[in-house]
Every structure is written in C-alpha cells, then in structure tokens.
C-alpha cells in the first residue's frame, strides 16, 4: 500500500500539481489537485501515514486548491477551493491553504454524506465502544479529543460522528485534529513530542494549527465501533471534574441540535437517533484539568 510518507516531498508536490492524488481518509477518498507548495507541505506532514491512490482511482470528492488568476497572485496572494470545478467560498489568504483544505473537506462530508446520520461531535473508541463528544465551539471538545487520542483512545473523528443506518455503528473518518488559540499551546505542553502543522494566524477562527493523527487511528480507519457513551463536555477554568448523568429525552434533543442532517432524514433520522440514545449512557462533563478528565474517561472505559 502506498502512503503519503512513502513519496518524497518533490514527488508528492509534482503529482498534486499535475494529475492530483486520491487521498484515503477512513471511509472517504478525495481527489486533491493543487500546485500550492504550502498545501503540499501540509499534506506531507499531517497525512504521512494515510493511503494514497493513483489519480484515476475512484474518489468521493473532487477538490482543487488554486491561486486566483488575478493581480492578487502577487499582491496579498490568495487561494480558493474548487469543488467539482466550482468555487463555493470566498478566497482566503495564501497562508491559509492547508486550513482551507481541511475546512473544505469537512464541508464536503457534511453536505454530501447523507447516507449517514451526521452529528457535529468528536468520537473516539476504546475496547470496541465509542464515546461521542458533541459540543459547541469554545467548549474544549477538540482539546479533550486530542488528549484522549494520545492516551489510549482511538480517534475516529475530531468533527464528524457518522452513524451507519443498517447497524448503528460509528464509521471512522480519522483526520488531523484542528486546534485553535490557547488550545495549541496547551496540547504542545501536555503531549509528548506532538507533531503540529505551523500555526496560521488571523483566520476566521483565530490562530489555528492541526495535530497529526495517531498512526493507529489511520491503520484502523476501516474499523467501525459500537456507540457506548455520549458525553457533552464543557471546559470551565478552575472547575472541579464533574460527571452528571443525563436523561434519554434530554440527550436526544441535545443530539438533534448537533446533527447536520437530522431534519433532512425525517422519520428515519428520528428513529436512528432514538436507537442510538437508547443504547448508550449519557453524561454532561465539566472539567478544567486534562489529567482529571483522563481519569474520568478511564473509569468510563472500565464500565462493563
């Protein structure tokens, strides 16, 4: 199997600029074409362990990251993302090429993969069971996800929980973990030799950087997991570590708020979510210290 890491940086850049590459990310493959060096640098660093296929292989999504053919190529240069040849978003500064690819790929999945029930939540697996972490921006979800992914939990996704309709299993979509602002420094200090993309300042989310996906999450990218817990995390400075049990009805409503296509799926979406909620234990978790959080999640994993 060919991986991104098996290609030299020069070969990767040349293939991306000419015919493109087909990058496998869990259950999805994306045909990516770009001649932007910063994007090739990001792919080489962040996707080192991911499989890569020939440009003519099947792909779920077709993405190009291009520089506009205007004077902006030279003055405050920009990049744009094309999906199936069409520009969907406003151009961004050239330095944001790699984050733009990551955000664009999230958009592709969220707007096209309606065969799954899609929930805006991180999800990780341990012992065959998955913990789903739905939360709004600023809740500490990605920080908690990054810590768990390097403390014995397998990363399935940082952003998208995909529930398969025929059996209710969670389908992995492992990719680099997106961190922003103070969370970047926190994880640089908390983890042992983490691999980050260069921080990019002044984005719509502030300063962002991506944390490389653990190798085990990539090699097990086709291995689904059965839902075990739903935990709504909330970071609160100075707060004690508190785990509160939630009723199923409340959990269902909160999960529906975090689902991308709950209404689109109609009765099917309701039934899928109701079945999911009925087979898991649900909690609200408040924390301030990551070591306390790791202990709490170890206790969850030890539940029969």
Image (cartoon, rainbow, N blue to C red):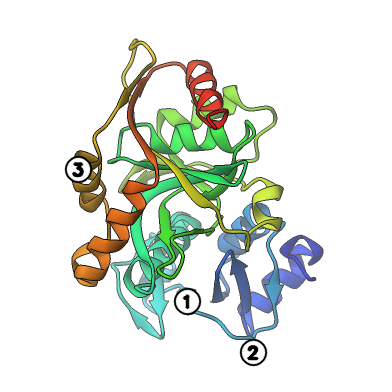
Q: Position of residue 269 (x, y in %)?
A: 26, 65
Q: Residue at x 43, y 46 (%)?
A: 122
N-term mark: 3 or 1: 1
- From mark 1 to mark 2, how far is it between C-alphas? 14 Å
- In the picture, measured across the screen, residue 279 lies left or right of residue 204, that is right
Q: Residue at x 39, y 47 (%)?
A: 279
Tag 1 residue: 63
CA separation in Å, label 3 and label 1: 40 Å
Specify the quadrant of the image occupied by residue 77: bottom left
Q: CA distance from mark 3 to mark 2?
A: 47 Å
Q: Is residue 303 left or right of residue 80?
A: right
Q: Provide the secondary structure element on which disc 3 rests.
A: helix
Location of mark 3 (residue): 249
**Do the CB atoms of the residues marked 3 and 1 lie less than 8 Å apart?**
no
| Mark 3 or 2, nearer chain start | 2
Q: Residues within 10 Å of mark 1 (few under 14, many from 20)?
A: many
- Would you place residue 278 above or below residue 89 in this image? above
Quarter of the picture containing the N terminus is bottom right
Q: Are marks 3 and 2 in contact (CB under 8 Å)?
A: no
SS under mark 2: loop
Q: Nearer the viewer, residue 124 or 129?
A: 129
Foreground mark, 3 or 2, reads 3
Please identify, in this view, whether the residue under mark 1 or under mark 2 is nearer the observer: 2
Using the image, tell me which numbered label, if any, was put on residue 84. none
Q: Which mark is residue 56?
A: 2
Q: Is residue 60 above or below residue 185?
A: below
Q: Is residue 282 visible?
A: yes
x, y (%) of residue 170? 48, 57
Residue 207 falls left or right of residue 10: left
Please provide percent x and percent y for residue 130: 50, 45
Identity of the residue drawn at 64% across and 58% down:
41
Mark count = 3
């Amino acid at each position: 199997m060919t991986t991104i890491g098996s290609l030299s940086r020069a070969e990767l850049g040349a293939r991306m600029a000419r015919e493109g590459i087909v990058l496998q990310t869990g259950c999805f493959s994306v045909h990516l074409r770009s001649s932007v060096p910063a994007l090739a640098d990001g792919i080489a660093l962040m996707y080192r362990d991911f499989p890569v296929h020939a440009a003519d292989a099947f792909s779920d999504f077709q993405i190009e990251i291009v520089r506009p053919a205007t004077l902006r190529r030279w003055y405050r240069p920009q990049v744009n993302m094309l999906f199936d040849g069409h520009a969907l978003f406003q151009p961004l500064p050239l330095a944001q090429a790699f984050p733009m690819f990551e955000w664009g790929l999230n958009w592709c999945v969220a707007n096209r993969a309606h065969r799954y029930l899609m929930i805006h939540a991180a999800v990780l697996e341990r012992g065959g069971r998955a913990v789903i972490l739905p939360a709004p921006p600023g809740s500490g979800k990605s920080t908690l996800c990054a810590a768990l992914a390097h403390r014995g939990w397998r990363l399935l996704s940082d952003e998208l929980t995909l529930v398969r309709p025929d059996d209710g299993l969670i389908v992995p979509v492992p990719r680099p973990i997106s961190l922003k602002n103070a969370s970047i420094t926190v994880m640089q200090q908390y983890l042992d030799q983490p691999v980050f993309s260069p921080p990019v300042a002044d984005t719509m989310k502030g300063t962002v950087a991506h944390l490389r996906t653990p190798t085990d999450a990539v090699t097990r990218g086709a291995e689904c997991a059965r839902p075990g817990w739903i935990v709504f995390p909330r970071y609160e400075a100075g707060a004690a570590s508190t785990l509160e049990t939630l009723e199923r009805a409340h959990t269902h409503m909160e999960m529906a708020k975090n689902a991308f296509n709950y209404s689109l799926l109609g009765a099917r979406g309701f039934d899928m979510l109701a079945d999911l909620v009925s087979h898991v234990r649900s909690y609200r978790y408040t924390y301030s210290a990551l070591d306390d959080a790791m202990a709490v999640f170890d206790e969850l994993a030890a539940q029969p």
